[in-house]
Image (cartoon, rainbow, N blue to C red):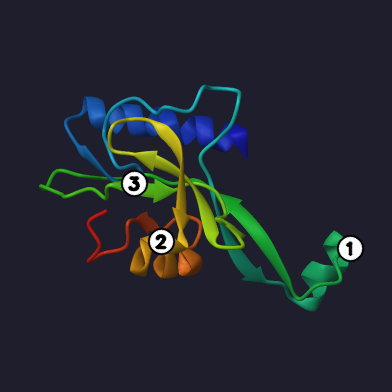
Amino acid sequence: TPDGYARIIEARDRLIAAGLTVAAPCPHSEACPIEPGTDWCHFSARVSRSSLHRQVKGGSLPYEDEKFSYVVATRFATEPVLARVTRKPQIRKGQVLLDLCTRDEALKRSTVTKRHGELYRAARDIAWGDAWPPPGDDA
């Protein structure tokens, strides 16, 4: 939830103040570029539901997509990713739109087209929360 995310950001700030380095999901240890109250950094995981869970929640599907936020911090040296995919990629004919949180402490939208070759093929397979570019690519 947005309230849970606010607690994660507070914990992140405390970890940084204690001298730790953010290793994930953020590609940097600077201030979060998301304007408080406008959005919240979160990811999604598909979770199986038991029949009792479906009954209690009034659901019909055998799964539910749960949203979550997290932070990983370390005292050890780390090489953060260049960027992290912060929304479900939008796949269109001949292009993929990626919303990214980048190392330069900014949120940006990147468009990857067929002209990008291997990078385009990787973008079609990338998931919300993954590092960008994929390991082995240096775009």
Q: Residue type at mark 2?
A: Arg
Label whose residue precedes the other's in the sequence (3 or 2): 3
Q: Which residue is mark 3?
A: 83
Q: Earlier in the sequence, mark 2 or mark 1?
A: 1
Q: Amino acid at mark 1?
A: Gly
Q: Is residue 48 above or below residue 105?
A: below
| Front disc: 3 or 2 | 2
Task: Residue under label 2, please give it.
Answer: 115
Q: Are the residues at dot 3 and dot 2 in contact (C-beta closer than 8 Å)?
A: no
Q: Nearer the viewer, mark 2 or mark 1?
A: 2
Q: Residue at x 37, y 60 (%)?
A: 116
Q: Residue at x 51, y 56 (%)?
A: 128
Quarter occupied by residue 16: top left
Looking at the rendered structure, the secondary structure element under dot 3 is: strand
Density class for disc 1 (Cα within 10 Å; few <14, some 14-19, many ≥20) is: few
* Front-most of residues 113 and 23: 113
CA separation in Å, label 2 and label 1? 46 Å
Label 2's element? Answer: helix
Residue 139 on image: x %, y %? 27, 53
Say what amino acid the circle numbered 3 marks. Answer: Ala
What residue appears at the point 30 percent right and 42 percent down from the top-left corner?
27
How far apart, in angstroms, are the residues tagged by discs 3 and 2?
21 Å
**In the image, is 66 to the left or to the right of 87?**
right
Do we see residue 24 in this rendering?
Answer: no
Label disc, if present, on residue 58 of the rendered structure: 1
**Residue 29, quarter of picture:** top left
Disc with the residue nearer the chain's start (1 vs 3): 1
Q: Residue at x 39, y 28 (%)?
A: 32
Q: Position of residue 63 (x, y in %)?
A: 71, 71
